[in-house]
Image (tube, rainbow, N blue to C red):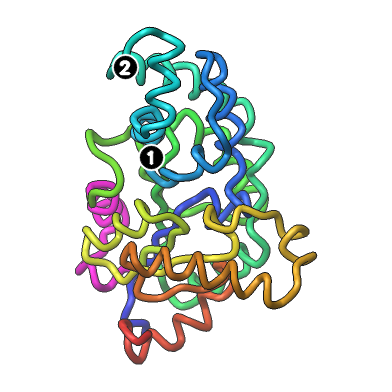
Amino acid sequence: MSKFKAVVFDWAGTMIDFGSFAPMGVFVEAFKRFGINATIAEARAPMGAPKRAHIKAMLMAPRLSAEWARAHGAAPTEADIDRVYEVFVPMNEEVVADYATLVPGAAEMVADLRARGLRIGSTTGYTRSIMERVFPLAAAQGYAPDNCVCADDLPEGRPGPLQMYQTFIDLQVYPPNAVIKVDDTEPGIAEGVAAGCVTVGVALSGNHVGLTPEELAALSAPEVAALRTRATDTLRTAGAYHVIDTVADLPALLDTLEQDPYHA
C-alpha cells in the first residue's frame, strides 16, 4: 500500500498544453486592446497565478505600468486590472480548447497512479468558465481527475494553500504530507508548499521552457540540458522537493518516494 493518498496536478503545462501556450497570446492580445504592447516573456513571468492576479502582476511591472501611464494618462488602478481581466477571460475561453491536448504519457501515468490506489486531484489558475471548456476534452483523452478547484472558486488562490485545502476536503485525504502536488510554475509549487504537501516540479513540459514537443525534439542534448537546468533551478527555488521532465516520469519517481518522500 502506498504511503501517499493522492496526487494533485496543475493543468496547463503540467497535464495539458505542453509548453503552456494557451494564455500567452491572449494576454498579449488583451493588453493590445488597451494600447499596450506586452511581450510573451512578460506574459509568462507570473504564470501559475490566478488570472486576475496574473494581469495585476503584469500591469504593475515597471515597464508595462509606464506604458499604461503613457497610453492612458495615469498609473494603472484596480479598476484597470478589472477591465483587462474582463476582456481576457472570454478570449481565453475561446482559445483554450485548441490547447487541451494531454502531455504525452499523462493518461498512462494517471492509470498507473489509480492502480496504486491514489486519488487524483487538480487545481488551476484558470477560472471555472475556462475549465468547463477543457474538462470534456481531457476526459475524451482519458483524463478525468476526481476534482478541480479553479482560481475563482475561493476568495484566495495561489500561492496560498486554500485551493489545496479544498482539494483535501473534496478527496477526503490527509495529512498534507500524504499528498503530492505537481506543477510547472512557482505559484503552483508555492501552493503545495504552503499546504504542507510533497512538491514535484515539471521542467520540460512547462512554462519555463515554453516549447512544443516537436520544438524540444529538434534541439541538441546540451541545449535541452541547459533548459532543464534553468527550469529545475527555478522550481527548486520555489520549493519543489523534486523535479522531473514531464508527468510521464512520475511513476518512477513515486517508486523512489515510497522509500523516502523527501529524497532529492
Q: Which residue is mark 2?
A: 75
The residue where tag 1 is placed is: 150
Up the image or down, 22 lies above or below 241; here it is: above
Q: Nearer the viewer, mark 1 or mark 2?
A: 2
- Residue 192, given in percent of the width and then of the height, sits at 30, 60
- Please tell me whether mark 1 sits on a helix, a strand or a loop: loop
**In this picture, which residue range is highlighted in magenta?**
162-179
Kind of residue at disc 2: Ala
* Dots 1, 2 in contact, CB < 8 A: no
User: What secondary structure predominates along the stretch shown in magenta?
Assistant: helix
Within 10 angstroms of label 1, few (less than 14), some, or many (20 or more) residues? many
Task: Identify the amino acid type marked 1.
Answer: Cys
Which residue appears at 53% of the width and 53% of the height? 207
Q: Is 226 placed left or right of 45 in the picture? A: right
Q: Residue 64: image x %, image y %?
A: 43, 28
Residue 33 visible in image: yes
The first of marks 1 and 2 along the sequence is: 2
